[in-house]
Image (tube, grey):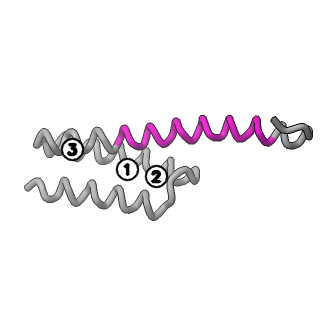
Amino acid sequence: MANIKSARKRARQAIQRRSRNVSLQTRARGAVRDVKKAIAAGDRKAAAAALVRSQAVIDRVAAKGVLHRNAAARQKSRLAQAIKAMA
């Protein structure tokens, strides 16, 4: 444990930031999982609706810096391609 007051504060802040980031990452993974489930079930309409919801979640997570913006764009693009290929 840190001895200097500022270092103790930084450690506390790091713990709070990490818990917030883990929560956001989990939410983004869950949104992607919902889209993949709908694709696997063959339900194009549900997959498209889930894609819209997941894109919003992914964008929010990327805006907060938890996910790199290019990684977010790549995820959204791959999900959209998968839905388009369902035809």
Name the residue furthest left.
87
- Disc 1 designates what residue? 55
- Disc 3 designates what residue? 47
Vertical relation: 85 (above or below) 52: below
Which type of secondary structure does the marked residue at label 2 adopt?
A: helix
Q: Residue at x 48, y 42 (%)?
A: 25
Residue 16 lies in the magenta-colored region? yes
Which residue type carries mark 1?
Gln
Q: Earlier in the sequence, mark 2 or mark 3?
A: 3
Q: Earlier in the sequence, mark 1 or mark 3?
A: 3
Query: Does 6 sit left or right of 61 as displayed?
Result: right
What label sits on residue 59 in the rendered view?
2
Report crowding for label 1: few under 14, some 14 to 19, many 20 or more residues within 10 A (C-alpha): many
Where is residue 5, by image quadrant? top right
Q: Position of residue 39 (x, y in %)?
A: 17, 45
Which residue type carries mark 3?
Ala
Q: Residue at x 34, y 56 (%)?
A: 76
Which residue type carries mark 2?
Asp
Q: Residue at x 37, y 50 (%)?
A: 55
The residues colored magenta run 10-31
Query: Does 13 sit left or right of 22 as displayed?
Result: right
Query: Does 17 sit left or right of 56 as displayed?
Result: right
Q: Position of residue 59 (x, y in %)?
A: 46, 52
Residue 63 lies in the magenta-colored region? no
